[in-house]
Image (tube, grey):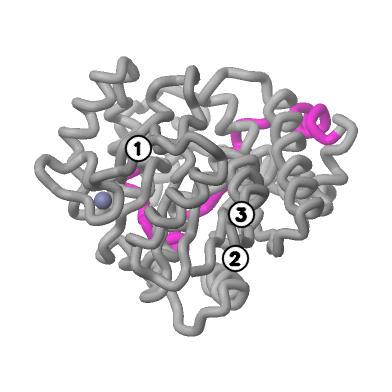
């Protein structure tokens, strides 16, 4: 059984990539296996990082998980961890297992203690998109997020290169711009023929551990009420509005974009990030052009300035509220 590890930063889209790959008949998406409590990777960290089973079955009363139920006892040595890992992922019953833990140290530990046939996909999100998501999660300034991004990807690349673990580098933005090419590159790397179903992958049985909840909303087994109940129990009440917003977005990468960073970050924020030593180098190794990202941001700002007129619908509901809205209203009346 071939093991493909998705490695990279948080918010790199690994859950949706894994779930889409899971629609291939020979791929089992195992999810964030390093979060299983029996592996003790997050002992002493946030309690919610430790889980005991798969996301979908865990959110469904009375559903028995064919993969992650009846977990063995916690392994006592790193070698035992490798044996337990192989036993568990074999339950997925496919030729290829995709481990979405993202944590390259997890892969390194398994590899260094005997795991065979491991390879990796370095899945990147551009540093500014990461910085925006990171800021939303922990309120760090954007430059700090960019620095963390550099450290994570620098570490990923070095850990893989030093161990001669085969890998490819691929970006989240490529998945949105050209999903066909993105997934065919991964399947070629995995040595598999056939394709994945980007539009209806959520109709295929899935048993992934952990992951971004947004990537599970389209599955029929996803139980929203149970999700809210669990989040409240774990003292981090879920944002119902955000979840509703997410559930209204298309699950297919063909209909999504990743431009929120251009709205959130100023050119000065981007300058501050690019000025951190090593950021441009790591971007270059991952296939990003710093100049192209700056150019895209400038174009975005210019386009926004040109189109900065409130939509007529708003003007009609609130006439007289704003000079520009009045102008629009007059045009509408004249027409
Ligand atoms: Zn399950």
* Between 57 and 71, the one nearer to me in the picture: 71
Check residue 120 for magenta coloring: no
| Residue linked to disc 3 | 114
| Residue linked to disc 2 | 117
Q: Is the magenta stretch mostly helix, strand or loop?
A: helix
Q: Which mark is residue 248?
A: none
Q: Where is residue 299 in the image (x, y as percent from the top left)?
A: 72, 48
Per the image, label 1 sits on a secondary structure element best described as: loop
- Residue pictured at 44% horizontal, 45% vertical: 33
Q: Is residue 304 at least partly visible in the picture?
A: no
The residue at the far left in this view is: 62
Between discs 3 and 1, the one toward the N terminus: 1
Asked if 36 appears above or below 3 in the picture, the reply is above
| Magenta extent | 246-274
Give the label, 1 or 2, closer to the camera.
1
Asked if 214 appears above or below 131 in the picture, the reply is below
Asked if 99 appears above or below 199 in the picture, the reply is above
Per the image, label 3 sits on a secondary structure element best described as: loop
Q: How far apart are marks 1 and 2 (CA)?
A: 25 Å
The residue at the far bottom in this view is: 193
Q: Quadrant of residue 286?
A: bottom right
Q: Position of residue 255 (x, y in %)?
A: 44, 60
| Residue linked to disc 1 | 73
Q: How far apart are marks 3 and 1 (CA)?
A: 20 Å
Other residues around mark 2 within 10 Å, as few (<14) / some (14–19) / many (≥20): few
- Residue pictured at 36% horizontal, 41% vertical: 213
Per the image, label 2 sits on a secondary structure element best described as: loop
Please state if 100 lies on the left or on the right of 59 as rendered. Answer: right
- Residue pictured at 41% horizontal, 63% vertical: 20
């Amino acid at each position: 059984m071939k093991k493909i590890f998705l490695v990279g930063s948080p918010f790199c889209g690994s859950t949706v990539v894994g779930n889409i790959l899971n629609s291939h008949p020979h791929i089992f998406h195992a999810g964030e296996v390093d979060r299983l409590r029996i592996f003790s990777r997050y002992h002493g960290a946030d309690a919610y990082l430790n889980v005991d089973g798969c996301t979908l079955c865990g959110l469904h009363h009375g559903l028995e998980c064919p993969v992650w139920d009846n977990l063995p006892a916690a392994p006592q040595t790193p070698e035992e961890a490798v044996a337990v890992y192989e036993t568990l992922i074999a339950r997925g019953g496919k030729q290829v297992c995709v481990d979405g833990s993202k944590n390259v140290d997890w892969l390194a530990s398994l590899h260094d203690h005997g795991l065979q046939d491991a390879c990796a996909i370095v899945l990147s999100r551009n540093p500014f998109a990461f910085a925006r998501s990171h800021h939303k999660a922990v309120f760090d300034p954007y430059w700090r997020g960019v620095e963390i991004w550099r450290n994570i990807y620098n570490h990923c690349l070095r850990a893989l290169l030093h161990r001669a673990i085969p890998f490819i580098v691929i970006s989240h933005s490529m998945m949105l711009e050209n999903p066909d090419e993105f997934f065919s590159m991964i399947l070629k790397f995995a040595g598999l023929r056939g394709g994945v179903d980007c539009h209806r992958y959520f109709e295929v049985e899935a048993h992934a551990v952990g992951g971004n909840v947004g990537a599970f909303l389209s599955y029929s087994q996803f139980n929203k009420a149970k999700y809210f109940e669990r989040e409240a129990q774990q003292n981090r009440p879920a944002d119902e509005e955000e979840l509703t917003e997410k559930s209204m977005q298309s699950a297919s990468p063909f209909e999504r974009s990743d431009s929120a960073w251009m709205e959130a970050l100023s050119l000065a924020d981007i300058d501050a990030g690019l000025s951190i030593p090593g950021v441009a180098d790591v971007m270059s190794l991952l296939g990003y052009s710093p100049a192209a990202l700056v150019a895209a941001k400038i174009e975005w700002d210019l386009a926004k300035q040109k189109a900065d007129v409130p939509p007529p619908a708003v003007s009609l509901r609130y006439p007289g509220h704003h000079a520009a809205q009045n102008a629009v209203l007059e045009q509408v009346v004249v027409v």
